[in-house]
Amino acid sequence: MSIIFPERMVIGTRASPLALAQAEETRARLVAATGLSPDALPLLPLTTTGDKIQDRALSEAGGKGLFTKELDAALMAGSADLTVHSAKDLPTELPEGLLVAGYLPREDVRDVFISRRADSLMSLPAGAVVGSASLRRQAQILRARPDLKVALLRGNVATRLARLDEGRVDATLLALAGLKRLGKADVATAILETDDFLPAVGQGAIALVARAGDSAVLAAAAAIACRDTGIALAAERAFLRALDGSCRTPIAGHATVHGESLRFCGLVLSPDGSRSVAVAREGGLGDAEALGEDAGRAVIAEAGLDLLRG
Ligand SMILES: NCc1[nH]cc(CCC(=O)O)c1CC(=O)O
């Protein structure tokens, strides 16, 4: 029996340069895997609530799904057939009727340090200001360097680099994956290794979301999906779900597949980095979700809910 792909699929995406690069990558992979022409895979760029809010930390703007609500609505209304997301920004629970149809092969998961004033986070002068909008990065910066200051810095990559050049902040951290996808990896001053600086759940992965019953679109997504990334993400997202992390809790988590085994590391911090609980687990590839969930429960047992509530 041959696989039936759709004749045409509208690809919903955010309109930011990074989102468009991710949607283009998805489109190119679909062309190669399904034989559809690029014209049969039009992009539908949408502006999300998260894109409009620029003056506040997103954790203060009402939480989850700020980058996904409009894309979910387009899927449900039928104006898009497949939506492309940074897995990092995808809530652990999707609306009824939608599901993750697959993940593309993961990019580099590491964060990078960018500064004109120092070669590394550890060599910044005391009191230097590091700009980031991520509570995880803020907490991890303060854990490594309690003498530094963190400041809210939002916006796309170009905006953040401009703030650095203006001297409004001394340094910033960004995901290497995003820089690579934008062809800007050369702006990195230093790469932070995962042992020192655990990335966010889903970092570097692109998630494809579709309608649950749409078998032709699901088949097309499956044709470009990466198995190992799916397994790693199942563990990471189960960890996040178990913690029920409000977006105000600094949480990091990273899983990797090594042959037949899956390794997971998780970390929860207080916002000021003074307290943290780390967890490590290893298991079989079939147990990814259970492993992540178990790691999340272990953190709750050790940390207590007050750490998690910040
Ligand atoms: N929340 C913003 C966001 N969502 C995904 C990425 C980078 C790409 C990725 O992690 O896949 C970024 C920017 C950043 O953290 O530097």
Image: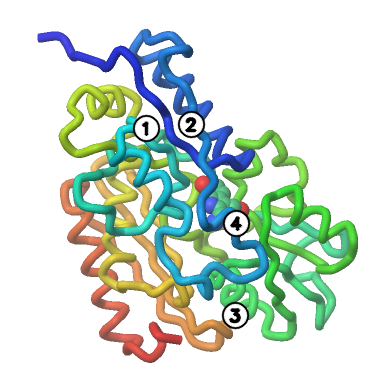
Q: Residue 196: where, in percent of width, then height? A: 56, 66
- In this picture, residue 150 sits left or right of residue 264: right
- Quick check: is the Cβ at mark 2 less than 8 Å away from ligand 1? no
Q: CA distance from mark 2 to mark 1?
A: 7 Å
Q: Are marks 2 and 1 in contact (CB under 8 Å)?
A: yes
Q: Label 3 sits on what residue type?
A: Arg
State how far apart marks 4 and 2 are (Cα).
Answer: 18 Å
- In this orientation, which residue lies closer to the viewer: 269 or 88? 88
The numbered mark at residue 143 is 3
Q: Amino acid at mark 4?
A: Lys
What residue is shown with label 1? 80
Residue on which the image places disc 4: 52
User: At x 61% / y 42%, what residue is drawn?
Assistant: 16
Distance between the alpha carbons at the discs numbered 3 and 1: 42 Å
Q: What amino acid is at disc 2?
A: Leu
The residue carrying mark 2 is 44
Comparing 161 with 12, the one in front is 12
Label 1 beta carbon less than 8 Å to ligand 1: no
Residue under the image location 56 percent in, 64 percent down: 197
Type of the residue with mark 1 = Ala
Which tag is nearer the camera, tag 2 or tag 3? Answer: 2
Q: Residue at x 71, y 58 (%)?
A: 113
N-terminal of the two: label 3 or label 1? 1
